[in-house]
Image: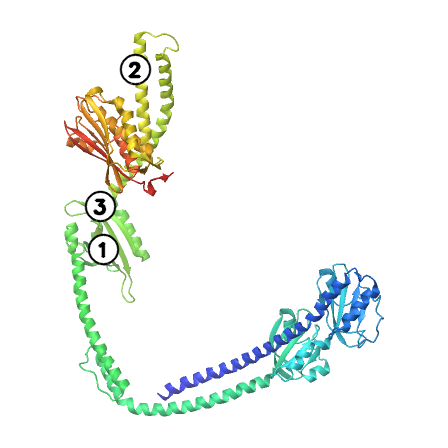
Amino acid sequence: MVLGLVVPVVVLGGFAIAFLMREQVVSAQHENMLVARTTRSKVQGKMAEPLQLAHAQAEIMQNPAFTTPDSRSAALKRAAEGSFAVDALMLTDSNGLVIAEGIDPGPSQYPGKFLGLDSSMRNGFAEAMRTHVAVWSDVFVSTITGNRSVSLVDPMDSGEALIVEVSAASFTDPLYQLRNNGESRVSILSGAGVVLYSTDQDLADTAADLSGLTIIRDARAEGEATDIYRYSGQRRLGSAVRVDETGWIILASREWNGVQATAQTLIAFLVLAVSVMVFGAALLARRLARAFGAPVEELTSDARKLAAGEYLKSPRVSRYRELAELADSMHTMSDAVLERESRLRASEERYRFLVESLRGVLWEYDVEADRFVFVAPQAGEMLGYPASAWTDLASWGEKVLDSERAGVLAARADGISEGYPHEMVYRMQAADGDVLWVRDVVSVVQEEDGPPRLIGVILDITAERQSESNRVAAQVAEDASRTKSVFLASMSHELRTPLNAIIGFSTVLAKGMVGPLSEEQERQIQMINDAGRHLLDLVNEILDLSRIEAGRVDIVAAPFEPSQLAAEVAELVQPLVRGDSVSLSIETTGAPESLLTDRERLRQILINLVNNAAKFTEQGSITLAVTSPDELSVAFAVKDTGCGISKENLPLLFREFGRLGVPAVEANGTGLGLVISQGYAKLLGGLITVESTLGQGSVFTLTLPRALPPESGTVS
C-alpha cells in the first residue's frame, strides 16, 4: 500500500520537474524574442524620418524653380541642417555622379568637396535604380564624417536619385533604453554579422564577428531564429530577428546558467514538496493498513462467496464510510445478479416462445459433425417433414426442388468454405407435393474453442414471389400501353396528311370545280368525303388520347366566365339536336362569376358530353347546368331524357372504343369521346361521374376546382 501511494507521487514529481524546466526555457525564449522584435520595431521607426525627408526633397528637386546645381545644393543643405539624424543629402544623375549636395557642416570633414563624385558603386545604388524602390545600405565608414553610417538611395521619376547619409549611431537609442531592462542583452549586427552596437560592453568594444553562429545564419535566412549558442566559452540562450530594410540582425540573449539557476530554484522547492508528500503518504498508508485490514478481508470473503454463486443476504456494517459504501455496493451487486438471473430465465422462456411461434423454420447445423443440432418444430407445419427428418446436409438437400438442388448445394458449400453470412432464395418441395418459394438466411458462428456452426432460418416467401410476379406483369402492361400510345401518336400524324388531301380533293370534285358530275358520281364522291371526315375525326381522337396517356398535354389556365362558355357550347351543338322533338337549354343560375382553368380543354369536354346526349336522345330535353357545390369547386351537369345506360354497362363506359349504344339507336362515333373527356378532366384536377337509368336518361357531371392546381399546369 505504501508503494501504491509513494510511486505515483514520485512519478508525478518527476513529470513536474521536467515540465518546470521546459517552461522556464520557453519563457526565457519568449522574453528574448519579445525584446528582439521590440528593438527591430524601434530601429525601423528611426528609418522613417530619412525616408520621408528623401521623398520630400525628391519632389523639390523636380520643381522647375530648382534647376541649377546651386539652387538644388542650397535646398539640400537646408534640409540636412534641419534634420537631427541626417548627415548629408546628395543628388546624383542616372549614372551616379553627384550633381548637387547638402552636407551638415557640423560633422563634415570635407564640406563642398563631393560634386562630381561617382556614387554608382555605393551599396544599394544599382539595386535602387533597377527596381525603382528606395534601398538602404549596410554599415560603412563615411568619407564625410569618418564615422559608421548607412545610406538610403531613393530613385526619382526623372532618372536621378537622392542619397541620404545617416549616422549609424542614430539607431542605437533603443539599445540605451534596454540597457537595464531585464536579463536580456541586445546587440545590433551588420548584414555581415559584425556587432555594431550592443548593451553587452565586451561585444561592443571588440566589434565581435558573430557571423559563424547558427542562430545568426538562420535569422538571416528565415527572418527569425532561436537557439542555444556558445561564445567566448559561455553558453547563451538567444533569439534573433532580421531588419529587412538593411539586412541587420537584432540579437537578444541571456546567460544559459541564469536560466538554469531559476529553474533549479523552482525544482528545489518542488523536490522538498514531493519529499514531504512522500513522507505523509507513508504515514497515511500505515494507518490505513491497520484500520482497513480486517474489514477488507471480510469484504474479500464476501466477494469469493458471490463469485461461487452464494448471494449475500445483508450488507456488512462498518464505521468507515468508504468501507460501508463498498459493502453496500457488493450487496446491491448481489441483488442485481440475482435479478438478472431471473430475467435471463424469463428471456429464455420468451426466446423459446418466439422460436416456436416464428413463421419459419429456425435451424442450427454443426459443420464438422455434418448434423443438424436443432430444427424448429415449424418444419413439420410448413413442409410436412418432422424435425427428426433433418439429420445431415444431404437430408436437407433432398427437400430442395430437383432442378435447383445442385446449384443450391454448391452455394451452401461455398458459404461454408468462405465462412461468411449468406442468403439464398430457392424452391422446396413439401411432403404433400406442393412447391414453396423459400428464403434461407444463414449466419456463420465461429467460437474460439468450438467447431464452426451455421445458424439460419427458412422463411416461406411464396406469397411474396407471387405478388412480385403480379407487379412485374402490371409494369409490363403499363410499358405496353405507353408504347401503344407513342405508336398511335406517330401513326396518327402520318395518317392526317393524306386524309386532309382526300377530303380536300373530294370537296373540290363535289363542287364541280373540275367539271360536271352525274348524280351517282356526286353521291359516291360525297360518301368518300364523309368517310374521310369520319376517319380524320377518329385519327384526331386517337392523337388526343395518345397525348393524354403519354403526359404531353399542355394545360394553360386563364380566367373566364363559365356561364358564357356554357352558352357558347349550346350554340355550337344546337345543329346536332334532333329537330323539334328535342329541346336544348342551359341553366347558369348557380354558376360562379369566374373560373381559372384551361378554357379550350373544358370546352372540348362539354361539347363531347352534350354531343353524346344529342346522339342518344330522340325526344325530350337536354339540359346543361352550371352550379357551385361549394366555394372551391364548380359542376357542369349534362342531363338528357335519352335511352339511358344499364347498370352492368356503367363500369365499361370510360373504356377505349367502348360502344354501349341501345340497338334502337344508331350513333356515329369512335367510342373515344368519353375516354378523352375523362382524361382532360383529370388533367384539370376534376372528374366526370355518371348516373343513369335504362330507358329514362342519364346525367353526366363534370366537377372541377375553381382554380387550376399549380401542379396541373401554368397560369397566363
Q: Name the one closer to the observer, 547 or 480.
A: 547
Where is residue 568 drawn, in percent x and y? Answer: 30, 28
Asked if one can make out residue 560 in the rendered structure from this viewpoint, the answer is: yes
Mark 1–mark 2 CB contact (< 8 Å): no
* N-term mark: 1 or 3: 3
* N-term mark: 3 or 2: 3
Numbered circle sitting on residue 527: 2
* CA neighbours of label 3 inside 10 A, class few (<14), some (14 to 19), many (20+): some
- Give the quarter of the image for residue 247: bottom right
Amino acid type, mark 3: Leu
Amino acid type, mark 1: Val
Label 3 sits on a secondary structure element that is loop
Amino acid type, mark 2: Met
- Residue linked to disc 1: 457
Which residue is depicted at the point 19% across and 69% down? 343
- Give the quarter of the image for residue 663: top left
Label 1 sits on a secondary structure element that is strand
Q: CA distance from mark 1 to mark 3?
A: 18 Å
Q: Quadrant of the C terminus?
A: top left
Where is residue 127 drawn, in percent x and y? Answer: 73, 63
Numbered circle sitting on residue 401: 3
Label 2 sits on a secondary structure element that is helix
Numbered circle sitting on residue 702: none
Q: CA distance from mark 3 to mark 2?
A: 67 Å
Q: Quadrant of the N terminus?
A: bottom left
